[in-house]
Structures are given as C-alpha cells and as structure tokens.
C-alpha cells in the first residue's frame, strides 16, 4: 500500500518540528495538544509514506525503536 500524500490538493500539511511540537498548516490556526495514540498514528503514516529513509533526531531512541517496529510490521503485513 502506498500513501499518496498530496501537497497541491491537500487540506492541511503536518510537519514535526521537534520531539514535542508539530506544525499543522491548514484553513484554521489552532493550538492544542494531541494524545500519544494520535502521535503514533501520524508517525506511522510518515514511516509508511517514506520511499527510502525516515529521518529523526539522533537521540530519539524511543522513536527509532517505534520506526523500526512499525516498518517491520508493515513489511510483514504486505
């Protein structure tokens, strides 16, 4: 399965800018927090949408483990 993440016809763009913050560009300006499950969902979409590499902060050991496990599960499910 391929995630066709669009830019031109997208309603919003979500960009992680640090381990604790993300930038969501859309029709409305919002500030808030999201639950850990939503963070995991967003990270999963980015991992599955990656063509070759997933970049992260070198000290993001928890995220690296999450990325490796997610990619491994996804390859197994394909």
Image (spheres, rainbow, N blue to C red):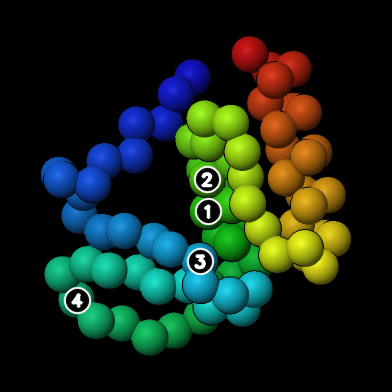
**Residue 16: which numbered mark, if any?**
3
Q: Position of residue 66 (x, y in %)?
A: 77, 49
Q: CA separation, marks 3 and 4? A: 18 Å
Residue 55 position (above or below residue 22) = above
Residue 16 position (above or below residue 73) = below
Q: CA separation, marks 1 and 4? A: 19 Å
Task: Identify the residue shown where x is 27% and y is 69%.
Answer: 25
Q: Quadrant of residue 31?
A: bottom left
Q: Nearer the viewer, residue 71 or 39?
A: 71
Disc on the earlier residue, 3 or 4: 3
Residue 58 position (above or below residue 6) = below
Task: Identify the residue shown where x is 77% and y is 63%.
Answer: 58
Residue for badge 1 = 42
Labels in figure, total: 4
Task: Identify the residue shown where x is 59% and y is 62%.
Answer: 39
Residue 48 visible to the viewer: no
Residue for badge 2 = 46
* Callout 4 crowding tier (Cα within 10 Å): few <14, some 14–19, many ≥20: few
Q: Quadrant of the C terminus?
A: top right
Residue for badge 4 = 28
Q: Give left or right: position of 14 versus 33.
A: left
């Amino acid at each position: 399965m391929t995630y066709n993440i669009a830019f031109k016809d997208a309603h919003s763009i979500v960009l992680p800018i640090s381990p604790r913050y993300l930038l969501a560009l859309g029709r409305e300006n919002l500030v808030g927090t999201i639950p850990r499950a939503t963070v995991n969902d967003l990270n999963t979409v980015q991992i599955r949408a990656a063509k070759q590499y997933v970049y992260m902060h070198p000290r993001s050991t928890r995220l690296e483990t999450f990325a490796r496990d997610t990619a491994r599960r996804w390859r197994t499910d394909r």
